[in-house]
Amino acid sequence: MSFDVQTARKDFPILQETAHGKPLVFLDSAASAQKPRAVLEAMTNLYSHSYANIHRGVYELSMRATDAFEEAREKVRAFLGAPEAREIVFVRGATEGINLVASTFGRTRVSEGDEILITHMEHHANIVPWQMLCEQTGAVLRVAPIDDDGALLVDEFEKLLTPRTKLAAVVHVSNALGTVNPVRELVELAHARGVPVLVDGAQAVPHQRVDVRELGCDFYVFSSHKVFGPSGVGALWGKAEHLEAMPPYQGGGEMILSVSFEKTVYNEIPHKFEAGTPDIAGVVGLGAAIDYVNGLGLDAIAAHERELLAYGTERLLEVPGLRLIGTAPHKASVLSFVLDGVHPHDIGTILDQEGICVRTGHHCAQPVMERFGIPATARASLALYNDESDVDRLVAALGKVREVFA
Amino acid sequence: MSELRELYQSVILDHNKKPRNFGVVEDANCAADGHNPLCGDKIFVTARVEDGVVEDLRFEGSGCAISTASASLMTQSVKGRSLDEAQALFEGFHELVTSDPKQAPSTAGLGKLEVFAGVREFPMRVKCATLAWHTLKNALEHEDATAKTE
Protein backbone atom coordinates (compact mmCIF):
# COMPACT_ATOMS: atom_id res chain seq x y z
CA MET A 1 0.00 0.00 0.00
CA SER A 2 1.42 3.39 -0.87
CA PHE A 3 -0.05 6.81 -0.49
CA ASP A 4 0.30 9.97 -2.52
CA VAL A 5 1.78 12.72 -0.41
CA GLN A 6 0.33 15.51 -2.55
CA THR A 7 -3.16 14.09 -2.02
CA ALA A 8 -2.51 13.69 1.69
CA ARG A 9 -1.32 17.30 1.98
CA LYS A 10 -4.73 18.49 0.76
CA ASP A 11 -6.26 16.84 3.81
CA PHE A 12 -4.48 19.34 6.06
CA PRO A 13 -6.05 22.81 5.78
CA ILE A 14 -3.25 24.58 7.65
CA LEU A 15 -0.69 23.66 5.02
CA GLN A 16 -2.33 26.32 2.81
CA GLU A 17 -1.24 29.03 5.23
CA THR A 18 1.52 31.50 4.58
CA ALA A 19 4.07 32.81 7.04
CA HIS A 20 5.74 36.15 6.37
CA GLY A 21 4.11 36.06 2.97
CA LYS A 22 5.75 32.76 2.03
CA PRO A 23 4.01 29.39 1.68
CA LEU A 24 4.30 27.45 4.89
CA VAL A 25 6.92 24.75 5.17
CA PHE A 26 6.09 22.91 8.37
CA LEU A 27 9.07 20.96 9.65
CA ASP A 28 8.18 20.80 13.32
CA SER A 29 5.78 17.87 13.58
CA ALA A 30 8.00 16.38 16.25
CA ALA A 31 6.92 19.25 18.49
CA SER A 32 3.31 18.92 17.43
CA ALA A 33 1.69 17.64 14.26
CA GLN A 34 -0.92 19.30 12.08
CA LYS A 35 -4.47 17.96 11.89
CA PRO A 36 -6.36 16.56 8.94
CA ARG A 37 -9.86 17.79 8.15
CA ALA A 38 -11.29 14.45 9.29
CA VAL A 39 -10.12 15.11 12.83
CA LEU A 40 -11.47 18.66 12.88
CA GLU A 41 -14.80 17.45 11.49
CA ALA A 42 -15.08 14.60 13.97
CA MET A 43 -14.75 17.03 16.85
CA THR A 44 -17.12 19.59 15.39
CA ASN A 45 -19.63 16.83 14.63
CA LEU A 46 -19.48 15.62 18.18
CA TYR A 47 -20.12 19.06 19.57
CA SER A 48 -22.82 19.70 16.96
CA HIS A 49 -24.74 16.41 17.15
CA SER A 50 -23.71 14.05 19.90
CA TYR A 51 -22.26 15.94 22.80
CA ALA A 52 -23.22 15.24 26.39
CA ASN A 53 -21.40 14.05 29.42
CA ILE A 54 -20.47 10.40 29.18
CA HIS A 55 -21.14 7.22 31.16
CA ARG A 56 -23.81 8.58 33.45
CA GLY A 57 -26.68 9.97 31.41
CA VAL A 58 -29.88 8.02 30.74
CA TYR A 59 -30.77 9.98 27.63
CA GLU A 60 -29.88 9.20 24.03
CA LEU A 61 -27.44 12.04 23.56
CA SER A 62 -25.38 10.76 26.42
CA MET A 63 -25.38 7.30 24.87
CA ARG A 64 -24.11 8.73 21.58
CA ALA A 65 -21.31 10.57 23.35
CA THR A 66 -20.42 7.55 25.47
CA ASP A 67 -20.34 5.28 22.44
CA ALA A 68 -18.11 7.71 20.55
CA PHE A 69 -15.78 7.93 23.54
CA GLU A 70 -15.54 4.20 24.14
CA GLU A 71 -15.19 3.53 20.41
CA ALA A 72 -12.12 5.74 20.49
CA ARG A 73 -10.75 3.71 23.37
CA GLU A 74 -11.12 0.55 21.30
CA LYS A 75 -9.38 2.29 18.39
CA VAL A 76 -6.44 3.10 20.65
CA ARG A 77 -6.36 -0.50 21.84
CA ALA A 78 -6.15 -1.79 18.28
CA PHE A 79 -3.64 0.94 17.34
CA LEU A 80 -1.26 -0.29 20.03
CA GLY A 81 -2.03 -3.97 19.58
CA ALA A 82 -3.08 -4.14 23.23
CA PRO A 83 -5.08 -7.17 24.41
CA GLU A 84 -7.93 -5.34 26.17
CA ALA A 85 -9.59 -1.93 25.98
CA ARG A 86 -9.74 -1.72 29.76
CA GLU A 87 -5.96 -1.46 29.71
CA ILE A 88 -6.17 1.90 27.91
CA VAL A 89 -6.27 4.96 30.20
CA PHE A 90 -6.93 8.37 28.69
CA VAL A 91 -4.66 11.08 30.07
CA ARG A 92 -3.59 14.55 28.94
CA GLY A 93 -0.57 13.29 27.07
CA ALA A 94 2.54 11.17 27.37
CA THR A 95 3.85 13.43 30.15
CA GLU A 96 0.80 12.86 32.31
CA GLY A 97 0.89 9.15 31.54
CA ILE A 98 4.43 8.89 32.85
CA ASN A 99 3.60 10.97 35.91
CA LEU A 100 0.65 8.68 36.58
CA VAL A 101 2.85 5.59 36.54
CA ALA A 102 5.54 7.25 38.64
CA SER A 103 3.01 8.42 41.25
CA THR A 104 1.13 5.17 41.57
CA PHE A 105 3.12 2.17 40.37
CA GLY A 106 6.32 3.93 41.36
CA ARG A 107 5.25 4.97 44.82
CA THR A 108 4.08 1.49 45.77
CA ARG A 109 7.03 -0.41 44.31
CA VAL A 110 10.02 1.82 44.89
CA SER A 111 11.70 2.57 48.21
CA GLU A 112 14.96 3.83 49.61
CA GLY A 113 18.06 2.45 47.94
CA ASP A 114 16.08 1.08 44.99
CA GLU A 115 17.07 2.05 41.47
CA ILE A 116 15.26 3.38 38.44
CA LEU A 117 16.95 3.01 35.08
CA ILE A 118 16.52 5.46 32.18
CA THR A 119 18.74 6.44 29.24
CA HIS A 120 20.78 9.51 28.41
CA MET A 121 18.58 10.38 25.44
CA GLU A 122 15.29 10.80 27.32
CA HIS A 123 12.91 13.72 26.97
CA HIS A 124 12.42 15.62 30.21
CA ALA A 125 8.98 13.98 30.53
CA ASN A 126 10.74 10.65 31.02
CA ILE A 127 13.35 12.06 33.39
CA VAL A 128 11.74 14.48 35.80
CA PRO A 129 8.89 12.29 37.10
CA TRP A 130 11.50 9.67 38.00
CA GLN A 131 13.73 12.28 39.64
CA MET A 132 10.76 13.37 41.69
CA LEU A 133 10.03 9.77 42.62
CA CYS A 134 13.63 9.31 43.72
CA GLU A 135 13.47 12.48 45.82
CA GLN A 136 10.30 11.25 47.49
CA THR A 137 11.45 7.70 48.14
CA GLY A 138 15.22 7.89 48.48
CA ALA A 139 15.71 5.79 45.37
CA VAL A 140 18.53 6.37 42.90
CA LEU A 141 18.30 7.25 39.20
CA ARG A 142 20.65 5.38 36.89
CA VAL A 143 21.31 6.53 33.34
CA ALA A 144 22.37 4.25 30.48
CA PRO A 145 24.85 6.05 28.21
CA ILE A 146 24.69 6.71 24.46
CA ASP A 147 27.47 6.76 21.89
CA ASP A 148 28.57 9.64 19.66
CA ASP A 149 26.01 8.66 17.03
CA GLY A 150 23.25 8.90 19.58
CA ALA A 151 22.67 5.16 19.78
CA LEU A 152 22.05 3.51 23.14
CA LEU A 153 24.90 1.40 24.51
CA VAL A 154 22.84 -1.70 25.12
CA ASP A 155 25.63 -3.52 26.98
CA GLU A 156 25.85 -0.62 29.43
CA PHE A 157 22.06 -0.65 29.80
CA GLU A 158 22.26 -4.31 30.69
CA LYS A 159 25.02 -3.74 33.21
CA LEU A 160 22.90 -1.10 34.93
CA LEU A 161 20.12 -3.61 35.61
CA THR A 162 20.85 -4.66 39.18
CA PRO A 163 18.91 -6.57 41.83
CA ARG A 164 17.79 -3.16 43.13
CA THR A 165 16.35 -1.94 39.84
CA LYS A 166 12.59 -1.61 40.25
CA LEU A 167 11.69 -0.04 36.91
CA ALA A 168 13.23 0.85 33.57
CA ALA A 169 11.83 3.71 31.48
CA VAL A 170 13.04 4.13 27.90
CA VAL A 171 12.07 6.19 24.91
CA HIS A 172 11.02 4.37 21.76
CA VAL A 173 12.15 7.11 19.33
CA SER A 174 14.26 10.05 20.51
CA ASN A 175 12.75 13.43 19.65
CA ALA A 176 16.12 15.17 19.72
CA LEU A 177 18.23 12.59 17.89
CA GLY A 178 15.75 10.45 15.95
CA THR A 179 17.31 7.29 17.36
CA VAL A 180 14.99 4.29 17.35
CA ASN A 181 15.72 2.09 20.36
CA PRO A 182 15.69 -1.73 20.22
CA VAL A 183 12.81 -1.80 22.68
CA ARG A 184 12.04 -5.50 22.43
CA GLU A 185 15.65 -6.35 23.24
CA LEU A 186 15.72 -3.91 26.16
CA VAL A 187 12.48 -5.35 27.53
CA GLU A 188 13.87 -8.88 27.32
CA LEU A 189 16.99 -7.85 29.21
CA ALA A 190 14.92 -6.12 31.85
CA HIS A 191 12.35 -8.89 32.24
CA ALA A 192 15.10 -11.48 32.61
CA ARG A 193 15.89 -9.64 35.84
CA GLY A 194 12.28 -9.08 36.88
CA VAL A 195 12.34 -5.38 35.98
CA PRO A 196 9.15 -3.88 34.48
CA VAL A 197 9.53 -1.44 31.59
CA LEU A 198 7.70 1.74 30.64
CA VAL A 199 8.12 2.95 27.07
CA ASP A 200 7.69 6.57 25.97
CA GLY A 201 6.18 6.19 22.51
CA ALA A 202 5.30 9.83 21.84
CA GLN A 203 7.64 10.11 18.88
CA ALA A 204 7.14 6.53 17.64
CA VAL A 205 3.42 6.13 16.97
CA PRO A 206 3.23 8.75 14.19
CA HIS A 207 5.96 7.01 12.25
CA GLN A 208 5.72 3.27 12.68
CA ARG A 209 3.41 0.47 13.70
CA VAL A 210 3.55 -0.29 17.39
CA ASP A 211 2.49 -3.57 18.95
CA VAL A 212 2.86 -3.59 22.71
CA ARG A 213 2.50 -7.37 22.87
CA GLU A 214 5.42 -7.76 20.45
CA LEU A 215 7.46 -5.25 22.37
CA GLY A 216 6.60 -7.04 25.59
CA CYS A 217 6.73 -3.87 27.71
CA ASP A 218 4.60 -3.19 30.79
CA PHE A 219 3.51 0.38 30.04
CA TYR A 220 3.38 2.44 26.85
CA VAL A 221 2.46 6.14 26.56
CA PHE A 222 1.80 8.46 23.65
CA SER A 223 0.27 11.86 22.94
CA SER A 224 -2.57 12.57 20.54
CA HIS A 225 -1.16 15.86 19.29
CA LYS A 226 1.89 14.21 17.81
CA VAL A 227 -0.14 11.68 15.85
CA PHE A 228 -2.30 14.28 14.07
CA GLY A 229 -4.94 14.39 16.79
CA PRO A 230 -5.91 17.32 19.03
CA SER A 231 -3.71 18.51 21.85
CA GLY A 232 -4.67 17.89 25.45
CA VAL A 233 -5.20 14.15 25.30
CA GLY A 234 -3.06 11.05 25.20
CA ALA A 235 -3.12 7.45 26.26
CA LEU A 236 -1.39 5.21 28.73
CA TRP A 237 -1.49 1.48 28.10
CA GLY A 238 -0.62 -0.73 31.04
CA LYS A 239 -0.90 -4.46 31.65
CA ALA A 240 -4.17 -5.17 33.46
CA GLU A 241 -2.37 -6.87 36.35
CA HIS A 242 -0.38 -3.66 36.97
CA LEU A 243 -3.26 -1.24 36.58
CA GLU A 244 -5.42 -3.30 38.92
CA ALA A 245 -2.74 -3.30 41.61
CA MET A 246 -1.96 0.43 41.31
CA PRO A 247 -3.63 2.92 43.66
CA PRO A 248 -5.62 5.71 41.98
CA TYR A 249 -3.88 8.81 40.59
CA GLN A 250 -6.49 11.53 40.94
CA GLY A 251 -9.63 11.29 43.01
CA GLY A 252 -13.07 12.49 42.09
CA GLY A 253 -16.09 11.44 40.14
CA GLU A 254 -16.07 8.58 37.66
CA MET A 255 -13.15 6.81 39.31
CA ILE A 256 -15.39 5.56 42.12
CA LEU A 257 -18.13 2.97 42.44
CA SER A 258 -19.54 4.41 45.65
CA VAL A 259 -18.72 7.27 47.97
CA SER A 260 -19.63 7.75 51.59
CA PHE A 261 -17.84 9.47 54.38
CA GLU A 262 -17.22 6.11 55.95
CA LYS A 263 -15.82 4.38 52.91
CA THR A 264 -15.25 5.01 49.22
CA VAL A 265 -14.89 2.17 46.75
CA TYR A 266 -12.84 2.79 43.62
CA ASN A 267 -13.99 1.93 40.13
CA GLU A 268 -12.61 -0.79 37.91
CA ILE A 269 -9.87 -0.10 35.41
CA PRO A 270 -9.50 1.96 33.34
CA HIS A 271 -12.07 4.27 34.96
CA LYS A 272 -10.19 4.13 38.25
CA PHE A 273 -7.63 6.36 36.56
CA GLU A 274 -10.02 8.68 34.76
CA ALA A 275 -11.30 11.08 37.40
CA GLY A 276 -13.65 13.84 36.33
CA THR A 277 -15.11 14.61 32.96
CA PRO A 278 -12.44 13.87 30.36
CA ASP A 279 -11.59 15.75 27.17
CA ILE A 280 -14.43 13.97 25.37
CA ALA A 281 -14.01 15.77 22.05
CA GLY A 282 -10.25 15.35 22.30
CA VAL A 283 -10.59 11.60 22.68
CA VAL A 284 -13.01 11.43 19.75
CA GLY A 285 -10.53 13.54 17.73
CA LEU A 286 -7.75 11.13 18.63
CA GLY A 287 -9.91 8.25 17.39
CA ALA A 288 -10.42 10.07 14.10
CA ALA A 289 -6.67 10.68 13.82
CA ILE A 290 -6.00 6.98 14.29
CA ASP A 291 -8.56 6.20 11.60
CA TYR A 292 -6.86 8.69 9.27
CA VAL A 293 -3.42 7.23 9.83
CA ASN A 294 -4.70 3.68 9.41
CA GLY A 295 -6.41 4.80 6.20
CA LEU A 296 -3.05 5.75 4.74
CA GLY A 297 -1.33 2.80 6.36
CA LEU A 298 1.52 3.13 8.83
CA ASP A 299 3.76 0.93 6.72
CA ALA A 300 3.23 3.24 3.74
CA ILE A 301 3.86 6.28 5.93
CA ALA A 302 7.06 4.71 7.30
CA ALA A 303 8.27 3.95 3.77
CA HIS A 304 7.60 7.52 2.64
CA GLU A 305 9.44 8.95 5.63
CA ARG A 306 12.38 6.60 5.17
CA GLU A 307 12.89 7.87 1.64
CA LEU A 308 12.43 11.47 2.68
CA LEU A 309 14.85 11.08 5.56
CA ALA A 310 17.48 9.70 3.20
CA TYR A 311 16.91 12.60 0.78
CA GLY A 312 16.94 15.15 3.58
CA THR A 313 20.10 13.73 5.10
CA GLU A 314 21.89 13.77 1.74
CA ARG A 315 20.88 17.36 0.98
CA LEU A 316 21.71 18.67 4.43
CA LEU A 317 25.14 17.10 4.34
CA GLU A 318 25.82 19.23 1.25
CA VAL A 319 25.48 22.41 3.31
CA PRO A 320 28.95 23.68 4.24
CA GLY A 321 29.63 23.76 7.95
CA LEU A 322 26.57 21.68 8.84
CA ARG A 323 26.88 18.82 11.30
CA LEU A 324 24.08 16.34 11.96
CA ILE A 325 23.45 15.50 15.58
CA GLY A 326 21.97 12.03 15.87
CA THR A 327 23.33 9.63 13.29
CA ALA A 328 22.34 6.29 14.77
CA PRO A 329 22.05 3.45 12.24
CA HIS A 330 18.37 3.02 13.07
CA LYS A 331 16.73 6.44 12.93
CA ALA A 332 13.36 8.03 12.42
CA SER A 333 12.61 11.16 10.43
CA VAL A 334 14.24 13.78 12.63
CA LEU A 335 17.11 15.92 11.34
CA SER A 336 18.82 17.73 14.18
CA PHE A 337 21.80 19.81 13.18
CA VAL A 338 24.21 22.59 14.07
CA LEU A 339 25.79 25.09 11.70
CA ASP A 340 29.33 26.39 12.17
CA GLY A 341 29.36 29.86 13.59
CA VAL A 342 25.59 30.28 13.71
CA HIS A 343 23.51 29.63 16.81
CA PRO A 344 20.38 27.54 16.20
CA HIS A 345 18.24 30.36 17.46
CA ASP A 346 19.50 32.62 14.70
CA ILE A 347 19.01 29.84 12.14
CA GLY A 348 15.41 29.50 13.28
CA THR A 349 14.67 33.21 12.96
CA ILE A 350 16.06 33.44 9.44
CA LEU A 351 14.27 30.25 8.39
CA ASP A 352 11.06 31.70 9.84
CA GLN A 353 11.33 34.67 7.54
CA GLU A 354 11.33 32.18 4.66
CA GLY A 355 8.11 30.60 5.93
CA ILE A 356 9.93 27.57 7.34
CA CYS A 357 9.11 26.20 10.79
CA VAL A 358 11.86 24.34 12.57
CA ARG A 359 12.44 23.97 16.28
CA THR A 360 15.54 25.40 17.88
CA GLY A 361 16.77 24.85 21.38
CA HIS A 362 17.28 21.90 23.65
CA HIS A 363 14.07 20.07 22.66
CA CYS A 364 13.30 19.23 26.27
CA ALA A 365 16.38 17.05 26.23
CA GLN A 366 19.04 19.11 27.98
CA PRO A 367 21.10 16.05 28.95
CA VAL A 368 21.36 15.16 25.25
CA MET A 369 22.65 18.64 24.42
CA GLU A 370 25.21 18.40 27.19
CA ARG A 371 26.32 14.98 25.95
CA PHE A 372 27.14 16.45 22.57
CA GLY A 373 28.67 19.59 24.06
CA ILE A 374 26.27 21.96 22.37
CA PRO A 375 23.76 24.46 23.79
CA ALA A 376 21.08 23.66 21.24
CA THR A 377 20.30 22.30 17.80
CA ALA A 378 18.03 23.27 14.97
CA ARG A 379 15.65 20.41 14.27
CA ALA A 380 13.70 19.71 11.11
CA SER A 381 11.25 16.85 11.56
CA LEU A 382 9.51 15.06 8.72
CA ALA A 383 5.98 13.71 8.83
CA LEU A 384 3.59 12.11 6.39
CA TYR A 385 2.68 15.43 4.75
CA ASN A 386 6.23 16.57 4.06
CA ASP A 387 7.80 16.15 0.63
CA GLU A 388 11.05 16.79 -1.20
CA SER A 389 10.17 20.41 -1.96
CA ASP A 390 10.02 21.05 1.79
CA VAL A 391 13.56 19.74 2.09
CA ASP A 392 14.70 21.77 -0.92
CA ARG A 393 13.28 24.97 0.55
CA LEU A 394 14.97 24.23 3.87
CA VAL A 395 18.33 23.83 2.15
CA ALA A 396 17.83 26.99 0.11
CA ALA A 397 16.98 28.93 3.26
CA LEU A 398 20.11 27.62 4.96
CA GLY A 399 21.96 29.25 2.08
CA LYS A 400 20.34 32.54 3.11
CA VAL A 401 21.54 31.95 6.67
CA ARG A 402 25.06 31.66 5.32
CA GLU A 403 24.62 34.96 3.44
CA VAL A 404 23.57 36.82 6.57
CA PHE A 405 26.34 35.36 8.66
CA ALA A 406 29.09 35.46 6.05
CA MET B 1 14.06 40.25 4.32
CA SER B 2 14.53 43.91 5.23
CA GLU B 3 13.43 43.30 8.80
CA LEU B 4 15.99 40.55 8.92
CA ARG B 5 18.63 42.98 7.70
CA GLU B 6 17.58 45.35 10.46
CA LEU B 7 17.90 42.65 13.06
CA TYR B 8 21.13 41.21 11.80
CA GLN B 9 22.80 44.39 10.77
CA SER B 10 26.54 44.70 10.49
CA VAL B 11 27.13 46.11 13.98
CA ILE B 12 25.34 43.20 15.57
CA LEU B 13 27.03 40.62 13.36
CA ASP B 14 30.39 42.21 14.09
CA HIS B 15 29.86 42.14 17.84
CA ASN B 16 28.70 38.54 17.62
CA LYS B 17 31.83 37.51 15.73
CA LYS B 18 34.18 39.58 17.86
CA PRO B 19 32.54 40.22 21.21
CA ARG B 20 34.17 43.05 23.12
CA ASN B 21 35.15 42.67 26.78
CA PHE B 22 34.80 38.91 26.56
CA GLY B 23 36.25 37.25 29.62
CA VAL B 24 36.25 37.54 33.38
CA VAL B 25 37.13 40.55 35.53
CA GLU B 26 39.88 39.29 37.78
CA ASP B 27 39.27 41.48 40.78
CA ALA B 28 35.52 41.57 40.38
CA ASN B 29 33.29 42.47 43.28
CA CYS B 30 30.04 41.83 41.40
CA ALA B 31 29.05 38.74 39.48
CA ALA B 32 25.94 37.02 38.23
CA ASP B 33 24.86 34.19 35.94
CA GLY B 34 22.14 34.57 33.35
CA HIS B 35 20.24 31.91 31.49
CA ASN B 36 17.56 31.93 28.83
CA PRO B 37 15.92 28.53 29.25
CA LEU B 38 13.96 28.94 26.02
CA CYS B 39 16.99 28.60 23.78
CA GLY B 40 19.98 27.83 25.97
CA ASP B 41 21.68 31.24 25.98
CA LYS B 42 24.05 31.35 28.97
CA ILE B 43 25.97 34.32 30.25
CA PHE B 44 28.29 35.14 33.14
CA VAL B 45 28.83 38.81 33.94
CA THR B 46 31.59 40.10 36.21
CA ALA B 47 32.26 43.68 37.22
CA ARG B 48 34.43 45.77 39.49
CA VAL B 49 32.55 48.69 40.98
CA GLU B 50 34.47 51.39 42.86
CA ASP B 51 32.96 54.53 44.36
CA GLY B 52 29.73 53.92 42.51
CA VAL B 53 31.42 53.61 39.12
CA VAL B 54 31.60 50.49 36.99
CA GLU B 55 35.36 50.45 36.49
CA ASP B 56 35.53 47.13 34.67
CA LEU B 57 32.89 44.94 33.10
CA ARG B 58 33.17 41.70 31.16
CA PHE B 59 31.06 38.79 30.10
CA GLU B 60 31.47 35.15 29.16
CA GLY B 61 29.05 32.65 27.79
CA SER B 62 27.53 31.02 24.77
CA GLY B 63 24.44 32.10 22.98
CA CYS B 64 22.81 33.33 19.84
CA ALA B 65 24.03 36.31 17.84
CA ILE B 66 21.51 38.66 19.44
CA SER B 67 22.41 37.79 23.02
CA THR B 68 26.15 37.86 22.34
CA ALA B 69 26.05 41.17 20.49
CA SER B 70 23.80 42.62 23.15
CA ALA B 71 26.20 41.62 25.91
CA SER B 72 29.16 43.00 23.99
CA LEU B 73 27.52 46.36 23.29
CA MET B 74 26.27 46.48 26.86
CA THR B 75 29.77 46.20 28.29
CA GLN B 76 30.94 48.95 25.95
CA SER B 77 28.09 51.23 26.98
CA VAL B 78 28.24 50.65 30.71
CA LYS B 79 31.98 50.47 31.38
CA GLY B 80 33.14 53.65 33.04
CA ARG B 81 29.63 54.82 33.91
CA SER B 82 28.08 55.37 37.30
CA LEU B 83 25.56 52.94 38.77
CA ASP B 84 22.79 55.46 38.19
CA GLU B 85 23.78 55.83 34.55
CA ALA B 86 23.87 52.03 34.19
CA GLN B 87 20.36 51.83 35.62
CA ALA B 88 19.15 54.50 33.18
CA LEU B 89 20.71 52.60 30.28
CA PHE B 90 19.04 49.38 31.45
CA GLU B 91 15.65 51.06 31.50
CA GLY B 92 16.22 52.82 28.20
CA PHE B 93 17.32 49.62 26.48
CA HIS B 94 14.39 47.65 27.85
CA GLU B 95 12.00 50.36 26.73
CA LEU B 96 13.57 50.37 23.27
CA VAL B 97 13.31 46.64 22.58
CA THR B 98 9.79 46.26 23.97
CA SER B 99 8.29 49.34 22.34
CA ASP B 100 5.71 49.23 19.55
CA PRO B 101 7.50 48.58 16.24
CA LYS B 102 4.98 50.84 14.48
CA GLN B 103 6.19 53.85 16.46
CA ALA B 104 9.56 55.47 16.02
CA PRO B 105 12.05 53.96 18.47
CA SER B 106 13.07 56.03 21.48
CA THR B 107 16.83 55.90 21.24
CA ALA B 108 17.80 59.01 23.22
CA GLY B 109 20.93 58.47 25.27
CA LEU B 110 21.44 54.94 24.01
CA GLY B 111 24.17 55.59 21.49
CA LYS B 112 25.19 52.44 19.64
CA LEU B 113 22.53 50.43 21.50
CA GLU B 114 19.97 51.86 19.09
CA VAL B 115 20.91 49.09 16.62
CA PHE B 116 18.65 46.84 18.68
CA ALA B 117 15.55 48.73 17.59
CA GLY B 118 15.18 45.96 14.98
CA VAL B 119 14.48 43.38 17.72
CA ARG B 120 11.03 44.89 18.15
CA GLU B 121 9.91 43.12 14.96
CA PHE B 122 10.98 39.82 16.46
CA PRO B 123 9.18 39.49 19.80
CA MET B 124 10.49 35.95 20.16
CA ARG B 125 14.03 37.34 20.33
CA VAL B 126 13.51 40.17 22.84
CA LYS B 127 14.59 37.94 25.68
CA CYS B 128 17.85 37.22 23.86
CA ALA B 129 18.56 40.95 23.73
CA THR B 130 17.67 41.65 27.36
CA LEU B 131 19.41 38.67 28.97
CA ALA B 132 22.75 40.44 29.39
CA TRP B 133 21.08 43.49 30.89
CA HIS B 134 19.03 41.49 33.40
CA THR B 135 22.20 39.67 34.37
CA LEU B 136 24.11 42.91 34.75
CA LYS B 137 21.36 44.32 36.95
CA ASN B 138 21.60 41.25 39.16
CA ALA B 139 25.35 41.53 39.36
CA LEU B 140 25.28 45.20 40.30
CA GLU B 141 22.65 44.54 42.93
CA HIS B 142 24.99 41.89 44.34
CA GLU B 143 22.37 39.23 43.88
CA ASP B 144 23.43 35.60 43.91
CA ALA B 145 20.54 34.17 42.00
CA THR B 146 20.79 33.25 38.33
CA ALA B 147 19.04 35.92 36.27
CA LYS B 148 16.24 34.60 34.12
CA THR B 149 14.35 36.53 31.54
CA GLU B 150 10.91 35.28 32.71
Image: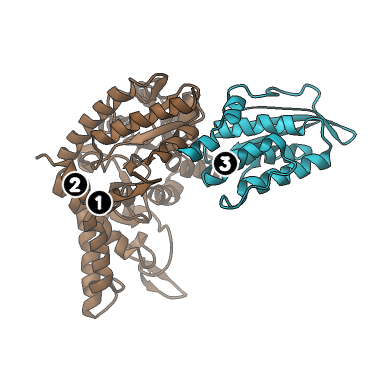
Give residue B149's position: percent from left, percent from top: 62, 44
Question: Mark 3 highlights which residue?
Answer: B118
Taking the view exactly as shown, the residue that stands out farthest to the bottom is: A59
Of B99 and A89, the residue lying toward us: B99
Q: Quadrant of the N terminus of chain B?
A: top left
Which tint was used for chain A?
Answer: brown
Residue on which disc 1 sits: A12
Circles 2 and 1 in contact, beta carbons < 8 Å: yes
- Residue A61 against residue A289 in the figure, above or below: below
Q: Position of residue A73 (x, y in %)?
A: 24, 58
For image coordinates 85% across by 34% down, the residue present is B53
Are circles 3 and 2 on residues that touch, CB within 8 Å? no
Callout 3–callout 1 Cβ contact below 8 Å: no
Which residue extends farthest right?
Answer: B51
Mark 3 and mark 1 on one chain: no
Name which residue type carries label 1.
Answer: Phe
Pick whichever, A333 or A8, lies toward us. A8
- Rate crowding at label 3 as few (under 14), some (14 to 19) or many (20 or more) other CA atoms within 10 Å: many
Disc 2: host chain? A
Circle count: 3
Asked if A187 appears above or below B21 in the picture, the reply is: below
The answer to whether tags 2 and 1 share a subunit is: yes
| Residues at discs 3 and 2 both on one chain | no
Q: Nearer the viewer, mark 3 or mark 2?
A: 3
Q: Colour of chain B?
A: cyan
Distance CA(mark 3)–CA(mark 1): 34 Å
* Callout 3 amino acid: Gly
Residue A45 position in % (x across, y down):
23, 68
Q: Which residue is mark 2?
A: A8
Q: CA distance from mark 2 to mark 1?
A: 7 Å
Q: Residue flagged by tag 2: what amino acid is it?
A: Ala
Identify the residue at image location x=72%, y=36%.
B111
